[in-house]
Image (cartoon, rainbow, N blue to C red):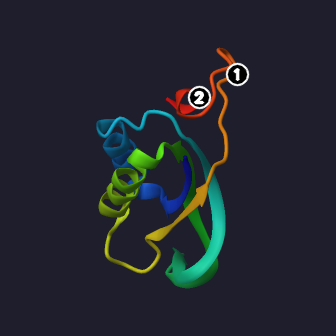
């Protein structure tokens, strides 16, 4: 099993969510986060441009079986990309075990 952590633009979240549902990734968690990156967002207030290094993003956490890893990552890469600086990052790590609390199933059965 793999844990996918993706930091994406908030404006791309709905598109990514729909694309994940299409490939049958139906369970994941997400948070609104603020980070610092290479992109510098600017805000205009009364005609004056203000620059800020704090960037609003959405952070997704998805645990998938090894078979779903490549299609899940590719789906996020394709749908979250605008081609501009600040599109985000994806991190993949190992998950040694997963449990479904209600049924006490473990392994792949615990995440599907």
* Image quadrant where residue 57 sits: bottom right
Can you say whether 36 is above or below 5 in the image?
below
Mark 1: which secondary structure? Answer: loop
In the rendered image, residue 72, in percent from the top left (x then y), is placed at 39, 51
Q: Nearer the viewer, residue 103 or 4?
A: 103
In the rendered image, residue 51, in percent from the top left (x then y), is placed at 59, 84
Taking the spot 64% from the left edge, 58% from the top edge, the residue there is 33
Residue tagged 2: 110
Taking the spot 59% from the left edge, 28% from the top edge, the residue there is 110
Q: Is residue 71 left or right of residue 104?
A: left
Taking the spot 43% from the left edge, 70% from the top edge, the residue there is 87
Taking the spot 40% from the left edge, 43% from the top edge, the residue there is 17
In the rendered image, residue 111, in percent from the top left (x then y), is placed at 55, 32
Tag 2: Cα neighbours inside 10 Å, few (<14), some, or many (≥20)? some
Residue tagged 1: 101
Distance, label 1 to label 2, CA atoms, is 8 Å
Tag 1: Cα neighbours inside 10 Å, few (<14), some, or many (≥20)? few
Mark 2: which secondary structure? Answer: helix
- Using the image, tell me which numbered label, if any, was put on residue 66: none
Can you say whether 70 is above or below 39 in the image?
above
Q: Nearer the viewer, residue 2 or 57?
A: 2
Can you say whether 71 is above or below 108 in the image?
below
In the rendered image, residue 22, in percent from the top left (x then y), is placed at 29, 38
Can you say whether 97 is above or below 95 in the image?
above
Could you tell me if the residues under marks 1 and 2 are in contact, i.e. CB atoms within 8 Å? no
């Amino acid at each position: 099993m793999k844990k996918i952590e993706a930091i994406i633009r908030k404006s791309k979240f709905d598109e990514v969510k729909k694309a994940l549902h299409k490939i049958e990734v139906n369970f994941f968690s997400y948070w609104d986060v603020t980070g610092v990156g290479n992109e510098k967002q600017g805000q205009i207030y009364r005609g004056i441009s203000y620059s800020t290094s704090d960037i609003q993003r959405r952070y997704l956490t998805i645990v998938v079986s090894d078979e779903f890893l490549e299609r899940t990552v590719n789906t996020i890469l394709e749908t979250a990309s605008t081609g501009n600086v600040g599109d985000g990052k994806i991190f993949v790590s190992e998950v040694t075990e997963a449990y479904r609390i209600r049924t006490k199933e473990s392994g792949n059965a615990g995440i599907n």
